[in-house]
Amino acid sequence: MPNILVSSQWLKDHLSSPNLIILDAHLPSNTSKIASTLEGLQIKNARLFDIKNTFSDQNSELPNTLPSPKYFETSCRSIGINKDSIIVVYDQIGIYTSPRVWWMFKTMGHDNVYLLNGGLPEWISQGFETEEKQNASYAKGNFKAQLNPNAVKNSNQLLENLNTNEFTVLDARSSDRFKGEKKEPREGLRSGCIPSSINLPFTEVLENGTFKSVAELKNIFNYLKLDEKELIFSCGSGITACITLVASELISEKKTAIYDGSWTEWGQNHQLPIA
């Protein structure tokens, strides 16, 4: 099996694998031109993975929050995912929402999960088969979730880190948002960044909807002159942080985690310091 990424050709060649499940990483707020153009299409036999309405904590005031292991397990079983499933995740843009789904499965203890590099646009560009989105039902799966608590950080841990400096925070938002030069898109959020954090816009690790090469990614991370500390990834609401986390995983063995509340939490809490 590949490490993290699979190509469209690889997926095409393995469509008949008995344990293969293809997931369409859907986020309703994704309104890009590409996504809206391809909204009604999916890779044949793909299953909807609704990040916002199903695979997030519905009781949280924050968007896209990681659900409890039990809720995640039950929701996975409802779309027929098993303990031995080989999961390939894609999204409508290329690389945007799919890394979040990859990270969620990894965090819940499922290692056989991979990203389709280039997503649906790349699949279509190769001339491979699509179909209209289906409202299918599936035999209940036996998926088992086992949370890795070290993969998720909260605001208290990041606040404590301002004194201990045990890990490095990388912010995936655009540089103008990171510097506080642009108003936040969500109402009620302050502008700025977490003190001592480093900016790595998620767009820097991508090119034409795919991850840049390993050599290019190494150059990008080397330029940041990071030490050997654990890397904590943040963004606006926990989605694009997963893109930069995957980029790190592709070229490094450093420990990584996601600050799940991200700037939506930090920016609205006036008790938390900003830079």
Image (cartoon, grey):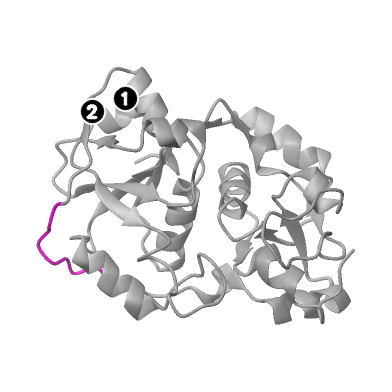
In the rendered image, residue 200, in percent from the top left (x then y), is placed at 74, 46
Mark 1 nearby-residue class (10 Å; few <14, some 14–19, many ≥20) = few
Q: Quadrant of the N terminus?
A: top left
> Foreground residue, 84 or 211?
211
Residue at left offset 81%, top offset 52%? 178
Q: Main secondary structure of the magenta part?
A: loop
Q: Which mark is residue 197?
A: none
Find out whether the residues at labels 2 and 1 contact each other: C-beta distance under 8 Å: yes
Name the residue that disc number 2 marks. 13
Place residue 189 in its image quadrant. Answer: bottom right
Q: Quadrant of the C terminus?
A: bottom right
Residue 222 in sight: yes
Residue type pointed to by label 2? Asp
Q: How many marks?
A: 2
Task: Say what secondary structure mark 1 lies in.
Answer: helix
Could you tell whether 173 is left or right of 162 in the image? Answer: left
Reply yes or no: does residue 179 show up in magenta.
no
In the rendered image, residue 51, in percent from the top left (x then y), is placed at 41, 59
The magenta-colored residue range is 136-144
Name the residue that disc number 1 marks. 9
